[in-house]
């Protein structure tokens, strides 16, 4: 059987970043995803540390954060590591569909719930949302499109909103993918642009659900901005995420083009461990169980959704390598008293503890597996939801894990 | 007899594995082009929660699922979405009388052999507008869809009548499952497969074989699919038990053998067959990588587009054809970034579904127009038919190109 340089388990942003980093270093890489990963769900913008106030210096903010949270995944990389990894990510998206910060640091962008959330890098289709004000923005809802409620968004943002019937008769009730696909058609987006223009009352910005095309979002943006003579932006909405799907497609296209092998749709259900080395993993595609071997492995299986972590009625476990999981001492302490509150629940800090090279360690700090590295949200000591740090952790640790695995 | 008596119904709890994350909605080729199919999340686990064996089906749209299985490949929770759809389709079909069209279409293997004998008469007939019009009116087989021409002699007869393979072909044995379409409609794919296997030092045999049964599965005829499976297992297991592995060149046949005979249809011996059954390109790639039996391909300076069929993705063993093609010096090979060709096998021949398949195919056609390849390569006969129809370009199985750059050629 072929022996790979690196097997990456997980196709979220952490796994894809690790795979891409390794491929760029010339490694023979196998990427395995049980499913498509979390990008299709939440991938929209790149959060790094939303707790840093908009406009404040990111470098200083992250340094302060690390000083106050010495176990945080960012402490493994520092700002230089985060910055380098983000630079590599941005390199994957050349103009016209780029990811950039607005101003010097975080900016606030509208969400599909009509709130404003802090984030760091925005795709070009969302940057205009960062500077919106209630007075200059028109929110466009699409009648019959259930995943984006324009009325809710405009009500909460206190700006004007209109619901448009789709330019082509009989298309109501279409899915986000169907809409994004239609937006890729010039004639469709032109007629939508005309329909928007007829509703405008001097607004300078237009907010739309994040369906501005799958293949050529920058062109969709260009057409709409040309016709409306306003700045247009996408607003993230319920899954599936079109912007996240674009990111996934870009990575997949790149990885396959560079010779990585991409296996999607079956779980890795077992690992062969000898001493402190992983010697192989087994992919289950019933009725077959196929072994794959590599020099190095990266575990980027995420948390509970993709079963990177598994919770039974009492304990949280890591099902593949059976790594120790840092977790609240008992079930009773998983959640706080109220479900919705500012601070995240203790269960969301559960995860794998590693050494500075991202190798998993036991409670005594001893490395358990020398050729396995852990990346992404499965790592312990972060609260990515509360911190607004999901993508930053994925990118920074995925990048670091691959660099360390391949000895650089 | 009800299908439930014969085949395992997924345990009731399976739909509850679904966490409603909607990832499947990001890949379904059907729900992105028509509002009449609610998409895998709703059609599969969503509707399954409301289906009772004792109640009649109400979901007419279940027939719109093409069984591409892309939803299965992206689900983070391991929900067997396409299988749920298939079971629902089977129940829906059981409650109605099967159509004459389905009866005819799923027997294309038998008719194929017959038509192949009379290809001189049949082929011109199938091109006649009047005949296509009749098929359209009487059987709802869409007249805009080109019917594949039949070739004579069949691959099987060509193979059996050709001079015995030269000694140089080597003494390692490999058996080849060619599939119906290769046998009667694309004989050259089979010839290319044999040439490639021989170039790698194998002596090729073609054990007796029948249609894999995937067309029957596609129309919800589980009983028919099981029958085909049982026949094939009794025909192919002896080969495997003699110690000879089997390769297939059609990814849909391969998927049926490897992952439906056992896990879905629960046929005895399926697992044994599955462990000895390989995608032919994957098989050759492994030989190439092991280095002992690799060949050095000749130079060919052509720009080709490669398209990965949906069922190849479900086989989930990578893109071996693409990797092999990359070993050809001078060849400019690029991936066609599209999710699905849209044909869905027999699905695309059905009048009421033609518009859907055309709409899905547009995305692929646009990618091809952007790429401007001279030749398109893909492992699935359905995709080849559809891509020819969509682009008018020359579309081949990857082996047909590789055969031309083999060292001896």
Image (spheres, rainbow, N blue to C red):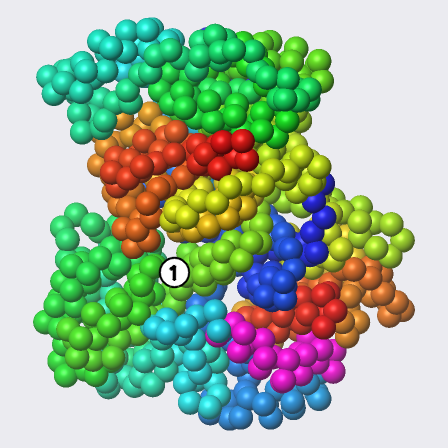
Depth order, front residue of A293/B334: B334
Depth order, front residue of B75/A8: A8
Q: Considering only vertical position in the picture, is A60 above or below A284?
A: below
Residue range (magenta): A70-90
Q: Chain of mark 1?
A: A
Q: Residue B181: image x %, image y %?
A: 39, 21
Marks counted in the figure total 1
Looking at this rendering, what residue extends furthest in the front direction?
B408
Q: Considering only vertical position in the picture, is A318 above or below B169?
A: below
Q: Specify the principal SS of the magenta part.
A: helix
The answer to whether any part of residue B80 appears in the image is no
Q: Residue B11: image x %, image y %?
A: 57, 29
Q: Residue at x 80, y 49 (%)?
A: A279
- The residue that label 1 is drawn on is A242
Is B69 one of the magenta-colored residues? no
Q: Residue at x 10, y 17 (%)?
A: B130
Q: Say which quarter of the image contains residue B118.
A: top left
Q: Considering only vertical position in the picture, is B237 above or below B309?
A: above
Question: Which class describes the residues within 10 Å of circle 1: few (<14), some (14-19), or many (20+)?
Answer: many
Q: Residue A101: image x %, image y %?
A: 44, 83
Q: Residue B189: image x %, image y %?
A: 43, 26
Left or right of A160 in this view: A198: left
Q: Say which quarter of the image contains residue A300.
A: bottom right
Left or right of B308 in this view: A6: right
Q: Is disc 1 placed on a helix, strand or loop? A: helix
Q: Residue at x 53, y 78 (%)?
A: A87
The answer to whether any part of residue A105 appears in the image is yes
Q: Residue at x 15, y 73 (%)?
A: A227
């Amino acid at each position: 059987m072929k022996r790979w340089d690196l097997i990456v388990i997980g196709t979220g942003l952490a796994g894809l970043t690790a795979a891409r980093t390794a491929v760029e270093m010339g490694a023979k890489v196998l990427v395995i995803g049980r499913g498509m990963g979390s990008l299709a769900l939440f991938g929209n913008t790149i959060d790094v540390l939303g707790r840093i106030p908009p406009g404040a210096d990111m470098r200083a903010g992250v340094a302060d954060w690390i000083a106050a949270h010495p176990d945080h995944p960012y402490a493994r990389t520092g700002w230089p590591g985060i910055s380098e990894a983000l630079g590599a990510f941005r390199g994957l998206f050349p103009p016209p569909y780029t990811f950039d910060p607005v101003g010097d640091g975080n900016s606030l962008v509208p969400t599909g719930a009509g709130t404003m959330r802090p984030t760091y890098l925005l795709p070009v289709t969302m940057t205009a949302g960062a500077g919106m004000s209630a007075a200059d923005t028109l929110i466009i809802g699409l009648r019959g499109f259930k995943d984006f409620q324009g009325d809710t968004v405009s009500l909460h943002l206190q700006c004007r909103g209109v619901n448009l019937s789709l330019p082509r008769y009989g298309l109501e009730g279409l899915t986000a993918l169907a809409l994004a696909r239609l937006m890729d058609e010039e004639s469709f987006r032109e007629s939508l642009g005309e329909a928007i223009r007829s509703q405008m009352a001097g607004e300078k910005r237009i907010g739309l659900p994040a369906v501005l095309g799958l293949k050529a979002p920058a062109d969709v943006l260009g057409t709409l901005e040309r016709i409306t003579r306003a700045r247009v932006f996408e607003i993230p909405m319920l899954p599936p995420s079109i912007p996240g799907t674009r990111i996934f497609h870009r990575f997949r296209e790149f990885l396959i083009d560079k010779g990585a092998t991409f296996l999607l749709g079956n779980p890795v259900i077992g690992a062969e461990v000898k001493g402190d080395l992983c010697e192989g993993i087994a992919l289950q595609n019933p009725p077959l169980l196929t072994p794959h071997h590599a020099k190095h492995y990266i575990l980027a299986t995420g948390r509970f959704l993709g079963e990177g972590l598994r919770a039974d009625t009492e304990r949280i476990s890591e099902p593949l390598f059976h790594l120790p999981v840092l977790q609240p001492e008992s079930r009773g302490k998983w959640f706080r008293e109220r479900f919705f509150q500012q601070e995240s629940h203790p269960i969301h800090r559960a995860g794998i503890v590693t050494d500075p090279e991202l190798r998993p360690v036991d409670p005594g700090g001893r490395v358990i597996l020398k050729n396995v590295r852990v990346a992404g949200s499965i790592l312990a000591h972060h609260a990515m939801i509360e911190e607004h740090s999901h993508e930053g952790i994925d990118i920074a640790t995925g990048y670091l894990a691959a660099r360390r695995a391949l000895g650089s | 007899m009800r299908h439930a008596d014969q085949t395992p119904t997924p345990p009731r709890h399976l739909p509850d594995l679904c966490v409603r994350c909607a990832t499947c909605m990001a890949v379904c080729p059907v729900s992105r082009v028509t509002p009449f199919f609610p998409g895998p999340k709703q059609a599969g686990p969503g509707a399954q929660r409301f289906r009772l064996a004792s109640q009649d089906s109400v979901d007419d749209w279940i027939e719109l699922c093409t069984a591409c299985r892309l939803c299965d490949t992206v689900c983070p929770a391991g929900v067997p979405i396409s299988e749920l759809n298939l079971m629902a389709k089977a129940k829906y079909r059981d409650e109605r009388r099967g159509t004459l069209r389905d009866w005819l279409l799923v027997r294309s293997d038998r008719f194929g052999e017959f038509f192949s004998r009379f290809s001189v008469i049949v082929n011109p007939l199938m091109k006649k507008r009047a005949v296509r019009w009749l098929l359209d009116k009487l059987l709802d087989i869409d007249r805009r869809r080109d019917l594949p021409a039949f070739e004579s002699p069949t691959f099987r007869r060509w193979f059996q009548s050709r001079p015995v393979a030269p000694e140089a072909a080597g003494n390692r044995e490999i058996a080849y499952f060619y599939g119906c379409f290769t046998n009667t409609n694309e004989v050259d794919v089979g010839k290319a497969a044999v040439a490639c296997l021989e170039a790698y030092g194998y002596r090729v045999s073609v054990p007796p074989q029948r249609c894999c049964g995937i067309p029957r599965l596609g129309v919800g005829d589980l009983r028919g699919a099981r029958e085909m499976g049982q026949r094939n297992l009794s025909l192919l297991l002896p080969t495997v038990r003699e110690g000879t592995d089997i390769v297939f060149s059609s990814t849909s046949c391969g998927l049926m053998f490897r992952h439906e005979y056992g896990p879905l249809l629960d046929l005895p011996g399926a697992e044994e067959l599955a462990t000895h059954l390989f995608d032919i390109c994957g098989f050759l790639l492994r030989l190439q990588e092991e280095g002992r039996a690799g060949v050095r391909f000749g130079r060919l300076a052509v720009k080709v587009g490669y398209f990965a069929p949906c069922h190849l993705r479900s086989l989930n063993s990578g893109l071996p054809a693409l990797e092999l093609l990359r070993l050809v010096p001078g060849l400019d090979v690029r991936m066609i970034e599209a999710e699905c060709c849209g044909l869905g096998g027999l699905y695309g021949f059905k009048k009421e579904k033609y518009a859907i398949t055309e709409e899905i195919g547009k995305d692929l056609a646009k990618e091809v127009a952007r790429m401007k390849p001279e030749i398109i390569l893909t492992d699935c006969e359905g995709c080849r038919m559809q891509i020819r129809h969509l682009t008018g370009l020359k579309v081949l199985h990857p082996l047909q190109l590789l055969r031309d750059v083999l060292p001896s050629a």
